[in-house]
Amino acid sequence: MRYLSFLFILFTCFSCSKDELFGDQVRHDLWLLHSGADIPIVVEGNTNSEVFVILLHGGPGGSAQDFNAGSKPFTDVLEKDYAMVYYDQRNSGLARGVWDEDKLTIEQHVEDLNEVIELILARYGLDVKIMLAGHSWGGYLGTAYLLSKSRADKVKTFINIDGLTHRNLRNRHSLAKIAEIGEAQIADGTNVEKWTNLLEEVQTERDKNITQYDRESENPVFRLNRLAVPIMDEDKLVQYNFSSETASVFRDNYDPFLIITNDRKGTLLEQMYDFDRTIDETLSEVTLPILSLYGKYDTNTSVQQGIYLHSKIGTDASDQELVILNNSGHSSMNNEPILLAEEMKSWIEKYR
């Protein structure tokens, strides 16, 4: 299948002129055929900049269309200055191909990402600059990609958006963040009864003193997070700014039915608990500039995940930054899209 990928790269390279490849506002729809997966890629925005920002979607099992179609107030700002690269990971979003449980691995996703980067370099030129960004699970995937120096050398910087960086710690961090927010709301006299009841359940879960979670023991944590989010919405702690769903479907080929049926995670969630150890052991070898942005009210992947990441990497202090978005939850691109985009632009300009 690597041979097929190579042929496809050659086809995309030589089928377009330079005038077609580069412009202030272009859209290119590509496919990467690799290891049984047909991966759709959209390159949209300012290719003249020669800066290509690859945006990794969450999940596992999400879709790049969540950004390109569903979060236009965020991505439109970035597309004015950069070429944004949106791709659906295998067995996610609008991807096609054979559904193979054996290929649903962290290592395979890392390899797929590397093929996407190689395709961009082959098509647009080895001099273009690759910026990597990942949201939620995309943060985990991006981190895993950087653990190899030969791969990291292809990337100028990594932007971690509400990213998962250590699945086991994530559960304890989530419980602590729910408690922190709830205690502040109770002290403020806001929604006291609901928060009190929820925090009683949170404390019961924390009293279990679980040091190593698994797919079964993490379920109560996910449940508590799902209970916390609507209370925060009721308290208006976060704001929302979405694209038009109608425009997303008809203008951007957003197919919610295919995306729902394609949401198959396989054993990826279980694998993360084992891969945490690899991250623990090798993060110090990562020296790439890294920016992390977290919503103040993100109880899914709290800012503690970013603190963990920045405490472990070997990057110079001057080349790493952690930013809190004060009116955001887990999906900051839908909460404070302009602020998120501007923070990213400032960082990209520093390393382009």
Image (cartoon, rainbow, N blue to C red):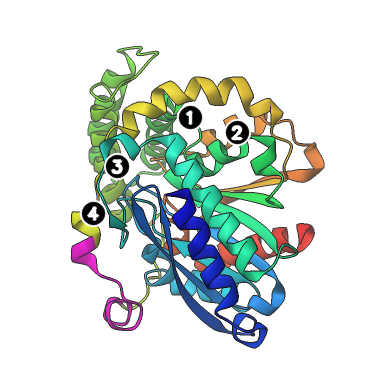
Which secondary structure dominates the residues rendered in magenta?
helix
Q: Which residue is at the far bottom?
A: 19
Label 2 neighbourhood size at 10 Å, few (<14), some (14-19), many (20+)? many
Q: Amino acid at mark 2?
A: Leu
Question: Looking at the image, is mark 2 or mark 3 nearer the viewer?
Answer: 2
Question: Looking at the image, is mark 4 or mark 1 nearer the viewer?
Answer: 4
In the depicted structure, whether residue 338 falls above or below residue 215:
below
Labels 4 and 1: the sequence-earlier one: 1
* Residue 167 screen position, x and y as percent: 42, 29
For the point 28% across and 83% down, the residue is 250
The residue wearing badge 1 is 166
Q: Secondary structure at mark 2?
A: helix
Q: Which mark is residue 228?
A: 3
Tag 2–tag 1 contact (CB < 8 Å): yes
For the point 24% across and 41% down, the residue is 227
Q: Amino acid at mark 4?
A: Asn
Question: Which span is picked out in magenta?
Answer: 245-258
* Residue 207 screen position, x and y as percent: 32, 13
Label 3 neighbourhood size at 10 Å, few (<14), some (14-19), many (20+)? many
Labels 2 and 1: the sequence-earlier one: 1
The answer to which of 248 and 150 lies nearer the viewer is 150
* Quarter occupied by residue 40: bottom left
The residue wearing badge 2 is 309
Question: Looking at the image, is mark 4 or mark 3 nearer the viewer?
Answer: 4
